[in-house]
Image: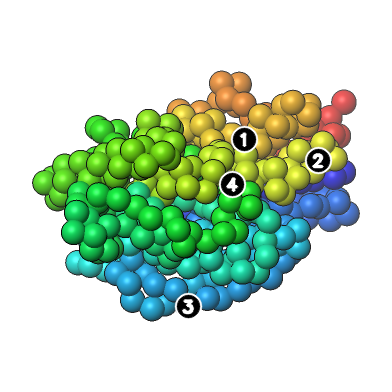
Amino acid sequence: MKILIAPDSFKESLEALDVCHAIQAGFSQVFPNADYKLLPMADGGEGTSAVLSYVLGGRWKEVRVHDPLMRPISAKYLLLPDATAVIEVAQACGLHLLTVAERNPVIASSYGVGELIADALEEGVKRIIIGLGGSATNDAGVGMLTALGMTFHDSDDTTLAQGGGALASLQRLDATSFHTSVLETVFEVACDVTNPLCGTLGASAIFGPQKGASSQQVNDLDQALSHFAAICEQQGYQNYQEIEGAGAAGGLGYALMSFCQAELKSGFDTVAEVANLLQHISDADLVITGEGKLDAQTAMGKVAGGISQIAKMSQTPVIAICGSVDGLESAQTSQFDVIMPSIQKLDTIDNVFKNAYHNIEITAANIAAAIKLGQSIK
């Protein structure tokens, strides 16, 4: 029996590869001779490059870049064997790099993301996959573009300061020194956010508060980003501000589309394509996936939902192991053949997280035992 184990991480408790090992440990108690394929998955956010490193190999490169407040830090990205770089914006401009008191999207910059891209271009890559998620910035990607050679000026022709707030003073941009390799490189952006750049559903309004913006700052930033898009359009650049995903990562989605000709794709679809997931599922007799919580959002770009859809197309049985279930209590009302929550007893949330590996292993062993029993029933 060929068993493909392809879960997402269980947030705050286990990385995807650890979940794979727990499921395999449980199943191996019952089916020790099965052919197991471990394929940890991700949805394009944080952790995606680690998953692709496990699946495809490659090498990590550490680079000195600048954090959202322009302080020097070390960040890393993945170089795959096929001249592809995988960059997570959170490595350079992640919210986790700042204390709560330091969060300020008016001045936070995506400059470090541009430094990572520039380094990858110097490595000679032909494709760059960028994971948008967990950013502390709201600068429409201007920091990133600055690191790639563009300059931005006010009415006095003074170079703008870093951060989204400064964009309110933008009068012109200059791409004379823009990195020459950008337009010779394929940019694929893993993005599950559908927000436009501006407006009530835009980057500032929806994500600004969690990045530290006050109500007034949200309004100011929204106007600044709208002004930036207008200036870009005046200078002949395609205006993508209403396109779904333009507001991702504080407007990095907009900048990548407008200046790098990037294609925005579902994060899961991006990872699935690079990892050759369809072929792995087609080769399997059984697929086991999972994530921390199965709910109505599972089918909307999440790993478990995406895997179940591919498995159904391949007519391969699919089992979901999760921490908890909300609204998908019956497999008959979902896209899975079996749904099995792993929490064994009422407990504190800290203990649930701490015992996640053990609970998943027990759950997997019980599922395997049920399969074996079913095989013996006449």
Q: Which of marks 1 and 4 is in front?
A: 4
Q: Is mark 4 on a helix, strand or loop?
A: strand
Quadrant of res 112: bottom left
Q: Mark 2 points at which residue?
A: 279
Give the residue at x 24% y 60%: 157
Closer to the chain start, of discs 3 and 2, is 3
Q: How crowded is mark 3: few (under 14 residues within 10 Å), some or many (20 or more)?
A: some
Instruction: Residue type at mark 2: give it.
Output: Gln
- Marks 4 and 2, Cα distance to the nearest angstrom? 21 Å
- Marks 3 and 4, Cα distance to the nearest angstrom? 23 Å
* In the image, residue 69 above or below residue 325: below
- Of 23 and 166, nearer the camera is 166
Relative placement, left or right, of 221 versus 146 is left
Closer to the chain start, of discs 4 and 2, is 4
Q: Nearer the viewer, mark 3 or mark 2?
A: 3
- Judged from this view, the residue extending furthest toward the left is 216
* In the image, residue 378 above or below residue 359: above
Relative placement, left or right, of 102 versus 268 is left
Q: Mark 1 points at which residue?
A: 306
Q: Mark 4 points at which residue?
A: 188
Q: Nearer the viewer, mark 4 or mark 2?
A: 4
Q: How crowded is mark 1: few (under 14 residues within 10 Å), some or many (20 or more)?
A: some
Q: How many labels does the image show?
A: 4
